[in-house]
Amino acid sequence: MTTTTATAEADRRTVSGSTPGAARGPRRTGRIRRIGLPYLLLLPALVLELLVHLVPMVIGILMSFKALTRFSIREWGAAPWSGLDNYKVSVDINAPAGEALLHSFWVTCGFTVLSVGLCWLLGTAAAIFLQDTFRGRGLLRTLFLVPYALPVYTAVITWAFMFQHDNGLVNHVLHDQLGLTDKPSFWLIGDNSFIALLTVSVWKGWPFAFLVVMAGLQNIPKELYEAAALDGAGMWQQIRRITLPSLRPVNQVLVLVLFLWTFNDFNTPYVLFGKAAPEAADLISIHVYQTTFATWNFGTGSAMSVLLLLFLLVVTGLYLLLTSRRRKTADV
Amino acid sequence: MAPPRSPMAAPRSFLWARRIFLTLLTGFVLLPVYVMVSSSLKPLQDVSGTFRWLPSGLTIRPYIDIWSTVPLADYFVNSVIVAGAATVCSVVIAVFAAYAVSRYRFRGKRVFTVTVLSTQMFPGILFLLPLFLIYVNIGNATGIALFGSRGGLILTYLTFSLPFSIWMLIGYFDSVPRDLDEAALVDGCGPLGALFRVVVPAAIPGIVAVAVYAFMTAWGEVLFASVMTNDTTRTLAVGLQGYATQTEVYWNQVMAASLVVSVPVVAGFLLLQRYLVAGLTAGAVK
């Protein structure tokens, strides 16, 4: 959206700016400089994106078609081609590798849907409740941003401490103080690890939604609320009829960004569980990391990453298509 | 900041819902913070046994020990250098790129913006191994040590925040009236003069927001830090794991070190957060 308006405005600019003030100056070089300048300005960003993102991605795709072991990895270019073998291994759900990848995929999907949903819910509710001024609003706003500001590893380490079996706060409260569980539970291994991971992810992620929704609320014209109040709409009705619909464009971007970050999240499970996550919380990034670096299946790991990227591309594409279509129909 | 809603008094149901929700949420948010602070002041036997809400005796011992159990100061310096350099470079590069996109029409502009934005969706794991190989190969070919050095990490990190920074700054620069820098051009400034004298000063909130984001991204990154550093270049993200020994985890020291590591970032962030909200309003949220 931003891009199209930028282009339109840039068009206007070049039209108005195409009458050079210095008619006597060397027009040719001036024009070359003007045409070359944007590229020159983009050059550093372009070179870095190429070096650190695009070239590695191309290499990663190439590697996914090669038979790579710990011995051939140093000379990966000379390693033999293996065609689609790595992909066959990755998607063969009757074999251990494919089965584990599919399991990890479903775990990640469930985790992402729940985490994004909860983050959005908490963030939106908090932003709306903090929309009006009341005593303590500024303090709460600052407090709510603390999880976002804390470095991932310190926050997640603290949660890992709270989820410890013997000396953690969670078991102390649930078992010793409230007596809700028969015996202290394990939170960082077994089925409960999914709950632990989700808790940490939501705790860490919701302030971003809060921040974005708060910014979005500022773009809603005051007159809308005033008109609604004149028509006799109460607070809850105003939220349902004005606030939430007005946030739709903001939400479309927010949900997409949250989805991509959560689906690709590596830091949270890695700090919470270490290099190998428990099966119930085996997020796909950790799974691919484990396949690549712990079992030395570099080719298979690359193939899995490429499949992951393809999935994200398709989902993002569909999402953008759907939301932009809905936006168009809404305009009509 | 937000537009106040109708002057109508809020109904009781709304006030109660607000009270309950905000209390619960505050508890949820502050719980780990409380654990971090209180545990960092506890003697070791307190954090090794059953959890206690209150310490049996306050001690600042963990804050003294953290510096000798692991070389925390070295990790700190590494993190500051890496995150600081990545932030400065990333902001400068993003300013140039966003200026070009916002103010000029050129061939390949759409391709550029779309490509840069889509790198946001790459799973980090996809280019970890290839990047590692590229750095090793560059090192072998040119003698420039990228792998294991701070330089390699800086190079990597600055691209992490770059797409988001460029995207946000384009929006921000678009909101700076074009007449301003056109007037500067007419007055005889070059394009760069117009950028630095007019556009950049007018977009300071956006630039600060982007810098905060870049710094936090670099300060908190774990995956690449754990693969691409060695004993001398290790950052805090990896270094904090050193408090866990084979037999025991010094949880009070872990918490003390976490707090020491977090305070500068959190303080900086909270001081500058209004810029972030302003930046998001003008840039990303449109």
Image (cartoon, coloured by chain):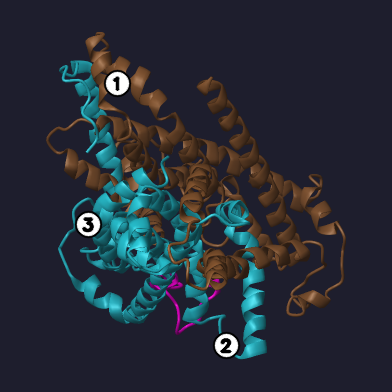
Chain colours: A brown, B cyan
Chain of the residue that carries numbered disc 2 in the rendered image: B
Residue in the picture at 61% in, 70% down: A51
* Furthest-left residue in this view: A135
Give left or right: position of B58 versus A210. Answer: left
Chain of the residue that carries numbered disc 3 in the rendered image: B
Q: Which image quarter holds the C terminus of chain A?
A: top right
Which residues, given as a range, are shown in magenta? B226-248
Q: How far apart are labels 3 and 1 at the CA level?
A: 32 Å
Residue B100 placed where, x, y %?
Answer: 49, 60
Are marks 2 and 1 in one subunit? no
* Furthest-bottom residue in this view: B143
Check residue B242 for magenta coloring: yes
Residue type highlighted by circle 1? Leu
Residue nearest the observer in this picture, A157 or A219 = A219
Say what secondary structure mark 3 lies in.
Answer: helix
Residue on which disc 2 sits? B144
Residue in the picture at 55% in, 52% down: B117
Q: Quarter-wise, where is residue B134 in the image? A: bottom right
Say what secondary structure mark 1 lies in.
Answer: helix
Q: How far apart are labels 2 and 1 at the CA level?
A: 60 Å
Q: Residues within 10 Å of mark 2 (few under 14, many from 20)?
A: some
Residue on which disc 1 sits? A224
Task: Select label 2 or label 1 by which is in front.
Answer: 1
Q: Which mark is drawn over residue B139? A: none
Residue A272 visible to an observer of this rendering: no
Chain of the residue that carries numbered disc 1 in the rendered image: A
Residue nearest the observer in this picture, A306 or A44 = A44
Task: Select label 3 or label 1 by which is in front.
Answer: 1
Q: Earlier in the sequence, mark 3 or mark 2?
A: 2
Say what secondary structure mark 2 lies in.
Answer: loop
Q: Which mark is drawn over residue B271? A: 3
Residue type highlighted by circle 2? Ile
